[in-house]
């Protein structure tokens, strides 16, 4: 029985801005309904401006729908306040962006330990052990003590992925994770996601322009003008 991890129910998102003192409504997502199931590796594709990042923000509780509901498992995150959302984000979600946002003055190990220590689920010693394992999983056992500026772009992104996995997220939400990488490093990041999905049944949603990347996932949701244009399971 497939189990929905993420569910959008008639989600719309309209932004209101002012132009020459006149309020202008821009509807980015008119009416979006879909589900992501546990264990799925899904790509969201579509042209620039089609609403992909907006969708990801809504999934991650970083933005709220104008109308409609967003669920994470059975929790309606669209009705939560900021404190509840931040708790849910820390407990259940891992984020990876195009730019890694690692803390420059800290080592790989410290960057990966940080979310664990912040959540208070692990002692410093346990966090260190787990961070070491995660960095080994992403192929960086020999870079534990390197700072971000001592790493290549691909290595930095792998540290960011290890960090996103620190609190065993229900779902990994990633926005153009290979957008800043060459093809070799993109392939490495893809292989890493594939392995996480296959070995650990990690649910992954990846927003990408990279057709080659998308075609290797299990499902492609193609967005045009904020609507699902096609939804293909391989
Ligand atoms: N804060 C904002 N204010 C005004 N318009 C916005 C804002 N955020 C997004 N938009 C508009 O909403 C639409 C969708 O944006 P979104 O970032 O979701 O697109 P995207 O599919 O992620 O594009 P890209 O592939 O270029 O990253 C765009 O037309 C964008 O200009
Ligand atoms: Mg985007």
Image (tube, rainbow, N blue to C red):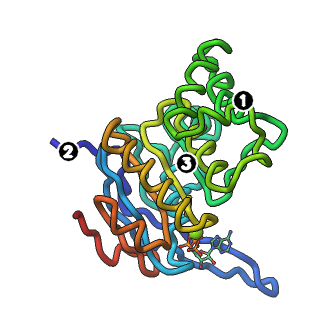
| 18 over 97 or under it: above or below | below
| 116 over 95 or under it: above or below | above
Q: Position of residue 137 (x, y in %)?
A: 49, 35
Say left or right for 55 vs 143: left
Say left or right for 17 vs 37: right
Residue 119's disc is none
User: Contact (CB < 8 A) between labels 3 and 1?
Assistant: no
Residue under numbered circle 1: 110
Distance (Cα) linking label 3 and label 1: 26 Å
Distance (Cα) linking label 2 and label 3: 23 Å
Inspect this view and state whether residue 35 appears: yes
Residue under numbered circle 2: 2
- The quarter of the rendering in which ligand 1 is drawn is bottom right
Q: Position of residue 210 (x, y in %)?
A: 47, 72
Residue under numbered circle 3: 61
User: Contact (CB < 8 A) between labels 1 and 2?
Assistant: no
Mark 1 nearby-residue class (10 Å; few <14, some 14–19, many ≥20): many
Distance (Cα) linking label 1 and label 2: 37 Å
Inspect this view and state whether residue 66 appears: no
Q: Earlier in the sequence, mark 3 or mark 1?
A: 3
Q: Earlier in the sequence, mark 2 or mark 3?
A: 2
Q: Position of residue 96 (x, y in %)?
A: 58, 50
Q: Earlier in the sequence, mark 1 or mark 2?
A: 2
Q: What is the quadrant of residue 181 in the picture?
A: bottom right
Residue sitting farthest toward the right: 105
Secondary element at image label 2: loop
User: Contact (CB < 8 A) between labels 2 and 3?
Assistant: no
Q: What is the quadrant of residue 190 in the picture?
A: bottom left
Say left or right for 141 vs 194: right
């Amino acid at each position: 029985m497939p189990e929905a991890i993420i569910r959008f129910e008639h989600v719309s998102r309209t932004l209101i801005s002012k132009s020459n003192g006149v309020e202008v409504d821009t509807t980015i997502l008119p009416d979006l309904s879909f589900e992501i199931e546990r264990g799925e590796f899904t790509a969201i594709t579509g042209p620039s401006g089609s609403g992909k990042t907006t969708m990801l923000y809504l999934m991650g509780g970083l933005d709220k729908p104008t109308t409609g509901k967003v669920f994470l498992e059975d929790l309606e995150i669209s009705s939560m306040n900021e404190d509840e959302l931040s708790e849910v984000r820390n407990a259940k979600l891992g984020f990876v962006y195009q730019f890694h946002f690692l803390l420059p003055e800290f080592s790989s190990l410290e960057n990966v330990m940080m979310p664990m220590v912040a959540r208070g689920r692990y002692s410093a010693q346990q966090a260190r052990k787990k961070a070491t394992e995660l960095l080994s999983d992403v192929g960086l056992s020999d870079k534990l003590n390197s700072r971000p500026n001592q790493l290549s772009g691909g290595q930095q992104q792998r540290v960011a992925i290890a960090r996103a996995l620190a609190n065993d997220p229900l779902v990994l939400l990633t926005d153009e994770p290979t957008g800043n990488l060459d093809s070799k490093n993109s392939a490495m990041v893809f292989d890493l996601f594939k392995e996480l999905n296959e070995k650990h049944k990690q649910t992954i949603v990846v927003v990408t322009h990279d057709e080659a990347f998308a075609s290797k996932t299990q499902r492609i949701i193609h967005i045009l003008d904020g609507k699902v244009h096609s939804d293909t399971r391989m």
